[in-house]
Amino acid sequence: AQSVTQLDSQVPVFEEAPVELRCNYSSSVSVYLFWYVQYPNQGLQLLLKYLSGSTLVESINGFEAEFNKSQTSFHLRKPSVHISDTAEYFCAVKAAGNKLTFGGGTRVLVKP
Amino acid sequence: DAGVTQSPTHLIKTRGQQVTLRCSPKSGHDTVSWYQQALGQGPQFIFQYYEEEERQRGNFPDRFSGHQFPNYSSELNVNALLLGDSALYLCASSLGLAGRSDTQYFGPGTRLTVL
């Protein structure tokens, strides 16, 4: 079975400052990794994913995540956040079968 | 290109009642998964449908059942509602079961409140 731990439940950050959201997973088999973002009262939107190849993956809106197999981590970073990045972020893994296993989420509050 | 749609948006039921939630997958997708997201938590996998059959199931009781139609749309049914069933129910669609890399795309969800 897989499990995902998001180490920070809330991350307050000032606008234009960098942010890092931590994600660690546990799995006995190889996994695929995803970050989803959820804006208030909305569903989940795919932010980025790691399937294979380069361990550094990027999204179109400036986020990046690095897959670290030895540390079983997939931390999400953005060098400069905007007010519009205020949302909840979920890390998820997929191994055998097609189900996604999610972490508990990290709420990012960007302050002006 | 239509994304994943869900209906209704909100629903209020009382304990013991039954509810049906509906989902239409993204155009071109044939696999539908359902997730329950309780307040302040991450989504939990309920089950997945492909070719009108339940293919995988999470740790949910038999009160939770589903169906997939020939046009790939899906329903989630919950019987004998409990207060703890109050949550956001999310539908996700993807293409096929063959590739573990298939990305799931989520709908906006149905907010169920059980009183």
Image (cartoon, grey):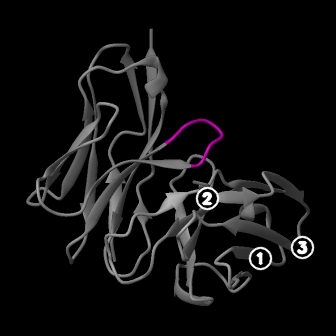
How far apart, in angstroms, are the residues tagged by discs 2 and 1? 18 Å
Give the magenta range. A38-43
On what subunit does the disc labeled 2 rest? B
Q: Is residue A42 magenta?
A: yes
On what subunit does the disc labeled 1 rest? B
Please provide percent x and percent y for residue B114: 83, 59
Q: Are the residues under marks 2 and 1 on the same chain?
A: yes
Q: Residues within 10 Å of mark 3 (few under 14, many from 20)?
A: some
Q: Please, is residue B106 above or below residue A76 in the view?
A: below
Q: Please, is residue B64 above or below residue A52 in the view?
A: below
User: As drawn, is B50 to the left or to the right of A82?
Assistant: right
Residue at 29% x, 59% y is: A33
User: As drawn, is B112 to the left or to the right of A29?
Assistant: right
Front-lying residue, A18 or A50: A50
- The amino acid type, in three-letter code, at marker 1 is Asn
Please provide percent x and percent y for residue A90: 42, 48
- The amino acid type, in three-letter code, at marker 2 is Val
Please provide percent x and percent y for residue A92: 37, 58
Mark 3 or 2, closer to the camera? 2
Tag 1 or tag 3, which sits nearer the N-term? 3
Q: Residue B16, which numbered label?
A: 3
Residue at 44% x, 20% y is: A110
Q: Are the residues under marks 3 and 2 on the same chain?
A: yes
Q: Residues within 10 Å of mark 2 (few under 14, many from 20)?
A: many
User: As drawn, is B29 to the left or to the right of A28?
Assistant: right
- The amino acid type, in three-letter code, at marker 3 is Gly
Residue assigned mark 2: B4
Q: Are the residues under marks 3 and 1 on the same chain?
A: yes
Instruction: Name the image quarter holding residue B61.
Output: bottom right
Mark 3 or 1, closer to the camera? 1
